[in-house]
Image: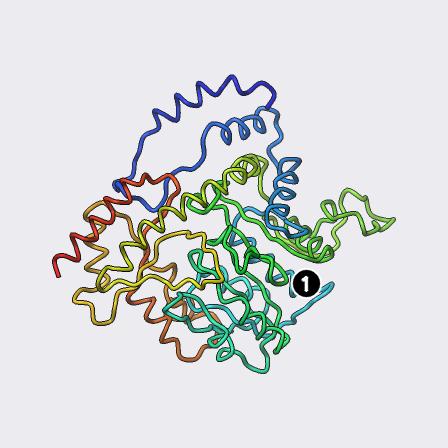
Amino acid sequence: MNGLSKLFPQIDLLLSKAPRRSKYWYPLSLPTYGRAEIAEALESMCSFRTTMGDKTAMFEKSFARYLGCPHAVMVNSGSSADLLLAFAITNPESALLHPGDEIVIPAVTWPTQLWAPLMAGLKVSLADIDPTTFNISAATIERACSPRTKAVFLVHLLGNPCEMDCVMSLARDRNLLILEDVCEALGSTWEGQKLGTFGFGAAFSFFFSHHITTMEGGMVTLKDALHADHVRMLRAHGWMRDVSGTRSSPVDIDPRYVFMNWGFNVRPTEVQAAFGLHQLQKLPTFNARRSSLATQFWTFIDEAPHLRRPIVSPKAECSWFALPLLIDRDAPFSRLELTNYLEAQGVETRPIVAGNLARQPAARIIHGISHGDLAGADEIHERAFYIGLSPMVESQTMARLIDCLKAFLALY
C-alpha cells in the first residue's frame, strides 16, 4: 500500500471517535470494515486512480475464484447487476430471449429484480411463495409458467437457498433458462455447490448491510465468455474497451472509441473495489459468525410460541443475511404489535423486503406483470418481518435480543 500503513494509527483513532448515531442498541447492521479497507481506498485516491481499473480487475478475479465461476463483472450496485443480467439474455447480438417472452420471478423480492426484465422488454409472471421457506419452489414456479415462459429469475431470500435440485429438474424438463439473484445469500450452498453457479448467471450485492460491503456495489457472474463480454459492454456504454480481446476493431474507427453494442454506465470505482479486496478475505469469518449467531437465535425461536422461522433444507448450508420470522395465524398478537414493541425497546425491524410485489402501487401502473393466486406471498406480506444479523454483534447482545422477545411473549 505504498507506505500508507503508517496511517493506521490515525485511522484507528478516527474509528474510535466515530459517533454512533443509531437510536437502536440492536440495529439492522453494523460496520464491518476497518483500517485495511480505508487505507486501500486512500491509496487509490492518493494515487489518483479512482475510476475502474486494476483493483476492480483484481477483485473480479478473486470473486470469480471464490465462487468457482469463470467470469465476474463488477458493477456499481446489486440492482445494476440484476439489470445487466436481464439485458444480457435479451442482447441483440446473441439474444436468448426476445421481447414478449416471459420470465418467472418471485412475488416477494426486491423490486429491481422485477423492474430489470420489464425494462429489457420481457413479460413477468409472479410466482407465489412457500411461506414455510419464504422462497419460490418448483411447484409455485410451474403454476406461474405459461407457453411463453422461457426463464426463471430465482432469489434466495434472506440467505435461504431455493430447492435447487427440484428447480433445476423443472428447468431441464421445460427448457427454462435459470438466473439467480444471490444479493442476500453470498456463501450459501446447495449440496456443497455455491449459489450463483447453477444457471446462466447471477447477481450479487455489496451494499452496506450485506455479507461483504463496498458501500454500494455489485457483481454479475457468468459461465460463458461471450456473454461476459456482452455484460462488460453493457456496463460501459457498449464500449469495446473492456472486452476480452476476441473481437477485431473496425478499421475506419479509432480503436479507443469503438462501440459494439448498446449499454449503460454502471461502472464501479476503484475505491469500491479497494474495499471489496479486503472484505472478500474476511467473508469466511463473517459468515461463520453469522451462522453462530443465527444458531443462538433459532435455538430460542424453535421453542418459542407463535413464531416460526423459514425451514432450511438438509441439503442446504444457509448464510443468513437477516433473521426472518413469521407470526402464526392464530397468534394473540399482530405483526404490528410485535414490531412496535421491538422498535420501542431499541430493536430495529423491517418487513420482508417489498412484501407481495403485486400489492405495491408501482405494479398497478406498469404493464407486463401477470400472476395467479399469491396466498403464500400474502402471508409473508401480512405476518412476516425480519431482524438484522451482523457478524459484529456480540453474543451477549444476541442474548439481550432473545430476552426482549421473551418479555413480549410473556405478555400473552
The extreme right residue here reads 251
Q: Which quadrant of the rendered structure holds the C terminus?
A: bottom left
Q: Nearer the viewer, residue 194 or 329?
A: 194
Q: Position of residue 115 (x, y in %)?
A: 50, 63
Compared to residue 46, the image places residue 62 above or below, namely below
Q: Which residue is mark 1?
A: 91
Labels in figure, total: 1
Determine whether the residue tagged by mark 1 lies in a helix, strand or loop. Answer: loop
Q: Nearer the viewer, residue 123 or 65?
A: 65
In the displayed structure image, the side of residue 183 where residue 389 appears, left or right: left
Q: Position of residue 89 (x, y in %)?
A: 65, 64
Query: The disc labelled 1 sits on which kind of residue?
Result: Asn
Q: How is the image coloured?
A: rainbow
The extreme left residue here reads 411
Residue at point 82% right, 47% down? 253
Q: Nearer the viewer, residue 100 or 365?
A: 100
**Mark 1: few, some, or many residues within 10 Å (few <14, many ≥20)?**
many
Residue at point 42% right, 52% down? 320
Compared to residue 331, the image places residue 386 above or below, namely above
Q: Position of residue 29 (x, y in %)?
A: 36, 44
Q: Position of residue 311 (x, y in %)?
A: 38, 64
Residue at point 65% right, 60% down? 88
In the displayed structure image, the side of residue 101 where residue 363 appears, left or right: left
Q: Which quadrant of the rendered structure holds the N terminus?
A: top right
Quadrant housing residue 225: bottom right
Compared to residue 261, the image places residue 39 above or below, namely above
In the displayed structure image, the side of residue 373 where residue 217 appears, left or right: right
In the displayed structure image, the side of residue 115 where residue 224 appears, left or right: right
Quadrant housing residue 13: top left
Residue at point 86% right, 49% down? 252
